[in-house]
Each structure stands twice: as C-alpha cells, then as structure tokens.
Image: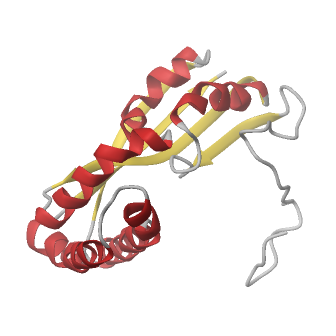
Amino acid sequence: MPTFLTPPPSNCTFYGGNVLSGIPFAQDHFDYVHQRLLVGAIPALEWPSVLQELVRVTRPGGWIEILESGAGYHNIGPAYHYLKKAWDAGIAQAGFDLSLMPHLDILLENAGLKNIKMRTVPMPLGKWAGRSGELMAIDIYNVFKGFKGFYTSQLNVSEKDFDAALAALPGEWEKHHTTYDFYLVYGQK
C-alpha cells in the first residue's frame, strides 16, 4: 500500500500488480482505464500485449486513456545531442523504443479500439516558461540523473562526460527554450 500525506478517499482502493504479467481483474471490469509514464518499464515488443491487457479489463463502450513521454525534444543544445546520440546507439539493445510513443494511436487501433483521439502535448523545460516549466525541468533533470548508471554501464559514456552533459542541460533548456513532448491518446472499446 502506498504511503499518503493525507488518506485517500473512502471510495478509492489500491492494488499491486504488473501489467506485464496481467492485470488482476476480470475481463470487462472497468469503464475507464488510465496508464501513464510506463514507457521506461515496458519493452517495445511487449506494447501490443500490454495494450491487449488494458482492452481485456475494459468494458465494451468503456475508454482507455494513455499518457506517455518519448524522445521528442525540441530546441536542444549540444549536451542533449551528446546524450541522445549515446542513447540512440544503445537503447535498442535494452529492448526499449521511445519512437513508438508518437504512434500510440495506431497501437490502440491495432488493439481493437475505436473513436481514437491523440494529441502531442509539448511541455516547456525551464524557468523561462514559468512555474510549470521549472517543475518539468526539475523532473526531467532527475530522470536523466536516474539514468546515469545505464549511460555509464550500458552506453559506454564515462562518468565525467555524463556529469558534464547533465550539468549543462538546465542552462541549455533556458537558452534554447527547450520543450519535451508528451503523447495523450484515448480510445473506446
């Protein structure tokens, strides 16, 4: 059970599960299913079966909504170019493919959904965009920081080079007014 600052509402219950192993609910159980930010946890080859599992637990006429991030950065600088080049060279070996995210609508259609709508939501990174940009920059910076071990052990980036690129990112985001794409897609069973 998660730890809460304030208790959840009385009509809210939390269950543990792993979408890769199957969602622990019966077929046609929910009117609405929401998934977000699992792109780093679901290997590329598993996306079709994960989406089929979401469809399985959704009632006919119900809705599935997905919010994911990918590799869509805009107005970037040399530190990000460096990190992206290393990422692109090695990520496929790890089984992940961020380039799938702009095509979630097609994946949902292939899973049998209809009335699919998708939009790309560009999120600004940095204080230049106000409080939301500042918070998003903190979040994305910490995502990169959390991948340090992966970059240094799997992508052959030295700790020194990684640390230098990481330190340069916030300044680049401010200078170039960098944005990062999120993908919102929903469809009906």
> Could you tell me residue 2's position as x and y percent?
79, 71
Q: Is residue 121 visible?
A: no
Is 126 located above or below residue 39 in the figure?
A: below
Q: Relative to 102, does residue 182 appear above or below in the rendering?
A: below
The one nearer the camera, 114 or 20, is 20
Task: State the quadrant of the C terminus.
Answer: top right
- Res 4 → quadrant: bottom right
Q: Is 84 situated left or right of 76 in this image?
A: right
Task: Give 116 or 37, whichever is nearer the viewer.
Answer: 37
Q: Residue 97's quadrant in the figure? A: top left
In the picture shown, does residue 74 fall above or below 57?
below
Q: Quadrant of the N terminus?
A: bottom right
Q: Residue at x 24, y 80 (%)?
A: 167
Farthest residue toward the bottom? 5
Q: Residue at x 56, y 39 (%)?
A: 43
Residue 42 relative to residue 52: left or right: left
Residue visible at 46% across and 68% down in the picture: 149
Task: Report whether 3 appears left or right of 68.
Answer: right
Which percent across, then down, holds residue 73? 24, 53
Residue at the image point whose x is 37% and y is 34% from the top? 102
Which color scheme does this rendered protein use? secondary structure
Of 103 and 9, the residue lying toward us = 103
Report how many numbered discs are placed on residues in the image.
0
Image location (x, y in percent) of residue 11: 87, 60
Q: Position of residue 128 (x, y in %)?
A: 18, 76
Q: Is residue 32 visible?
A: yes
Depicted 157 relative to depicted 112: above or below: below
